[in-house]
Image (cartoon, rainbow, N blue to C red):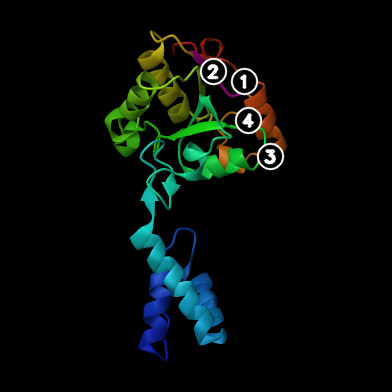
Amino acid sequence: MENFSSKLLQAAVEEFSKLPGIGRKTSLRLVLHLLRQEKEDVSFFANAIERLRKEVVYCKTCHNISDKEICDICSSPRRDKSLICVVEDLRDVIAIENTGQYHGLYHVLGGIISPMDGIGPDDLQIESLIKRINNSSVQEIILALSTTMEGDTTNFYIYRKLEDKKIKISAIARGIAIGDELEYADEVTLGRSIMNRTPYQLNIPNPR
């Protein structure tokens, strides 16, 4: 444990070190950086974090993080409302949007099925996806979850829930390496994986 000359400094370092991937040395470096900034700049920084926690909401349609009840993507008249891309979280939405290749809508599950972590289908936004499909003119669902065992399990669960409905169910092409997460894929590879998506039936893993 470091010997801090200030309890205020110590408290700030301890708070920063609670962030994922931030050790105490990095935390101290960040706090010292803030101390070197103008007080007004630090106030802007603190205000942005406070407003984020107090004012951010989840889109009532797709469950993406938003500033409004209906996010800009869902409310945009330029988006193709016949397409819904199913993703794990906001990071995947950002990754796909950065490709500039996809112009449909999204549905954010808020995670993937992972029994080891105690996450089951009822913990995700799967039922709301089904209701959304029932109440709209969606023609295709694109399953764009990470190519991990948990991602494949979630894809298959959603497929079984939707297979009796008259919509196309596809999955991103396996340009994304097995075990990779979308946020780490380069934009060109991810863009091609979306554009070259295939019917999900061709992606169903063999029983083990």
Q: Which of marks 2 and 1 is nearer the N terminus?
A: 2
Number of residues whose C-alpha sits closer than 10 Å to that of mark 2, classed few (under 14), some (14–19) or many (20 or more): many
Q: Which of 89 and 22 is in front in this view?
A: 89
Q: How far apart are marks 1 and 4 (CA)?
A: 11 Å
Helix, strand or loop at mark 2: strand
Q: Which of 66 and 45 is in front in this view?
A: 66
Q: How far apart are marks 2 and 1 (CA)?
A: 6 Å
User: Mark 1 and mark 2 in contact (Cβ < 8 Å)?
Assistant: yes
Q: Could you tell whether 184 is left or right of 168 in the image?
A: right
Q: Could you tell whether 172 is left or right of 143 in the image?
A: right
Helix, strand or loop at mark 1: loop
Number of residues whose C-alpha sits closer than 10 Å to that of mark 4, classed few (under 14), some (14–19) or many (20 or more): some
Q: Nearer the viewer, residue 93 or 116?
A: 93
Given the image, on which type of amino acid does mark 2 rest?
Ser
Residue beneath disc 4 = 176
Residue 81 in view here: yes
Q: Earlier in the sequence, mark 2 or mark 3?
A: 2
Given the image, on which type of amino acid does mark 4 rest?
Ile
Number of residues whose C-alpha sits closer than 10 Å to that of mark 1, classed few (under 14), some (14–19) or many (20 or more): some
Residue beneath disc 2 = 170
In magenta stretch: residue 169: yes
82 up-or-down from 2: above or below = above
At horizontal 65% and vertical 33% (from top left) the residue drawn is: 190
Given the image, on which type of amino acid does mark 3 rest?
Glu
Q: How far apart are marks 4 and 2 (CA)?
A: 15 Å
Given the image, on which type of amino acid does mark 1 rest?
Arg
Q: Which of 59 and 21 is in front in this view?
A: 59
Residue beneath disc 3 = 187
Q: Could you tell whether 124 is left or right of 39 in the image?
A: left
